[in-house]
Image (cartoon, rainbow, N blue to C red):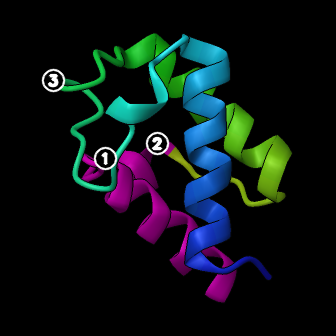
Amino acid sequence: MQTRQEIYDALRAALVELFEIEPERVTPAANLYSDLEIDSIDAVDLLDHIRRTTGRKLSANDFRNVRTIDDVVDAVWHKQQA
């Protein structure tokens, strides 16, 4: 089981690697859509990367209310608790 910090670190690395986002822009409060310019196709790629990296599959429903990096961390955290 991963800690919240480990989830955040993995997510941050993924955003930097997959979408070439500058690391300093990836903060817990950063909005995926307005701050980091993630679109719906990017979100699908991110969901797939999370599944491959953490072994936790997030559905579109799980991702529906996600807006910030911290929201993604919470979604993965809750999924692994189940």
| Whether residue 82 can be seen here | no
**Looking at the picture, which amino acid does disc 1 mark?**
Arg
User: 74 and 23: which one is in front?
Assistant: 23
Question: Which residue is identified by label 1?
Answer: 64
Residue found 58% across the figure and 24% down from its top = 16
Question: Which residue is identified by label 3?
Answer: 34
For the C terminus, give its image quadrant: bottom right
Percent across and percent down for residue 73 are 48, 63
Residue 67 lies in the magenta stretch? yes
Residue found 48% across the figure and 31% down from its top = 23
Part of the protein shown in magenta: 60-82
Q: Secondary structure at mark 3?
A: loop
User: 66 and 24: which one is in front?
Assistant: 24
Question: Are dots 3 and 2 in contact, CB under 8 Å?
Answer: no
- Note whether 8 is above or below 41 in the view shown: below
Percent across and percent down for residue 71 are 33, 60
Question: Which residue is identified by label 2?
Answer: 60
Q: Secondary structure at mark 1?
A: loop
Q: 52 left or right of 46?
A: right
Residue 12 lies in the magenta stretch? no
Q: 57 left or right of 44?
A: right
Question: Are dots 2 and 1 in contact, CB under 8 Å?
Answer: yes
**Looking at the picture, which amino acid does disc 2 mark?**
Ala
- Note whether 23 is above or below 62 in the view shown: above
- Label 3 vs 1, first from the N-terminus: 3
